[in-house]
Amino acid sequence: MSDRSPPTETPDLTLHQVAFARLSDGRVVARGTAREMAYHRTAGGRLEGQSAVAALYPGEGTGYAMFGETRLTAPRVEGDLGTRRGSATGGVTFRAARGDHGTTERLLWDGPSDRLSGDRPVEAQGPGYRVRSQGFSARADGSDVTLTGGVVGTLQPKPTDEQPIPNAQPTNRKPKATRRKPVEAR
Amino acid sequence: MIALAAALAVAAAPPGPVDFTAQTMRMEPRDRRTLLDGSVRLSRGGMVVTGDRAVVEFAPDEQPPARPQRKARRRGRDEPALLGQKLERFTVDGNVHVQRGERTADGSHGVFDSKAQTLVLTGDGKDDPVLRDGSETLRGDRIVMRLDTEDVDVQKPRLVLRRSVPEAEEEPQMPTRVEAARLSLDRSERLARFTDDVVVRRGDVVVRGPRMDAHYDPSGLLTHLYLRGGVEMRQGDRRATAQNADYDARTRELVLTGEPRLFDRGDVLVGEKIALALDSHEVHVERAHGRLRPEAHQDEAGAGVKR
């Protein structure tokens, strides 16, 4: 997927301090906020967001289940509703309840193939591992994740190498209804 | 041989992190494995393993204590695993090369077992795995390197003891070759123990026995071979049997004890001890008695001195 240049046209709709949730089978699987969300009606619909933060709740049995609640942040997000493709740019981070965290400059989503990918350096670490690569490609359900372009890492480091996140939540915990407070964007 | 058994160079690899590099890394959580492909390099505790590709398998999580009041959750091997689980095993395929101190090994297939603390190297059916330590080369069907010690087990070893005798430069090289069903290298004892169908060849000398211990000095040079359990030696027309055979690498003398018998073109000698100098073909028999047929040796020119 190529870089998208910033659209010059005025959005048809701009929302500020947006909060959203995604449900699947009656269960919240993701929720998030954005400081600003602009909608362009042209070309089938296009969304642009600023300072987006999303919390994902991977279901049991999925490839990401062991992470538990995972928070993603990105300074900019874009999505093309017609082609079902999007990107998050400007420094994407993730942080999981299990203690994993990582960063990459840009993340691309391809809806038709249900894949996530990145063509910029990726750094990630967590309990028992640390890894760097030049890019990645993954199924959206986490059933396979491939790091590409040269991979360097360590498995099972000494416990002192990795600081677990304080108050890490158990995996696969359903979000509590009281967690309404929007998470501040970085 | 063998710095394989010499204690000094390398410390045992401690359990610890595995550092890796590869061109790509594909994680398959549902299969609890991660595939490394392209110029794979894995290193752990002073040991480096390289190959074309590798599969890393993760151990299941520890089972939590049963809590009957709660619905049981799927745990263990059914649970997907990405990174972060304990490493159970990695398997390296294609041009596998192992470096551990001065010792190197090559094969087609290598399996590192984290729990057993072993690295098992095998071939592809055409080429056997090979272990090298300095100038020594050891081949076998299967080489098991023990990572918590410096010991090595080899199935069907084929070994050339090039450094077995520190021969002078003007002397022709005469390597000692050893075959057996199994070899165990005990680095701390500087001992190589061959068992089952041991065959030692040096020049025209062939010695067979059920088991043999090879001892080395601290520098890794062979000092003695001890064969036990019934030994047969052949050298041209000469044949000898005994319960035991001791070979001194420095003097290059083979000493047979335990009802030793020498058969040589019709001669039959029995004694307390029979010593054979492998280079000169001289034979010394202590307290000898037996049957001699001098007419059978008329074509020999001074070879063989018996007393």
Image (spheres, coloured by chain):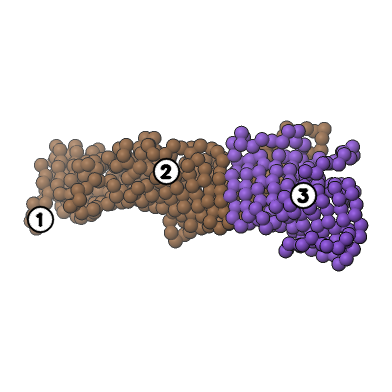
Residue A138: x, y in percent?
Answer: 71, 56
In the image, residue A106 sits, relative to residue B83, either above or below, namely: below
Q: Would you name the residue on which mark 2 appears?
A: B101
Q: Nearer the viewer, residue A43 or B222?
A: A43
For disc 1, the neighbor class at 10 Å (few under 14, some 14 to 19, many from 20) is: few
Q: Would you name the residue on which mark 3 appears?
A: A74
| Contact, mark 2 vs mark 3 (Cβ under 8 Å) | no
Tell me the element at label 2. Answer: loop
Chain B, chosen colour in render: brown
Q: Nearer the viewer, residue B23 or B211?
A: B23
In the image, residue B177 sits, relative to residue A110, either above or below, namely: above
For disc 3, the neighbor class at 10 Å (few under 14, some 14 to 19, many from 20) is: many
Q: Would you name the residue on which mark 1 appears?
A: B300
Q: Are marks 1 and 3 on the same chain?
A: no
Amino acid type at mark 2: Gly
* For marks 1 and 2 on the same chain, the one whose residue lies earlier in the sequence: 2
Tell me the element at label 3. Answer: strand
Kindly report which numbered mark, 1 or 3, lies closer to the viewer in this rendering: 3
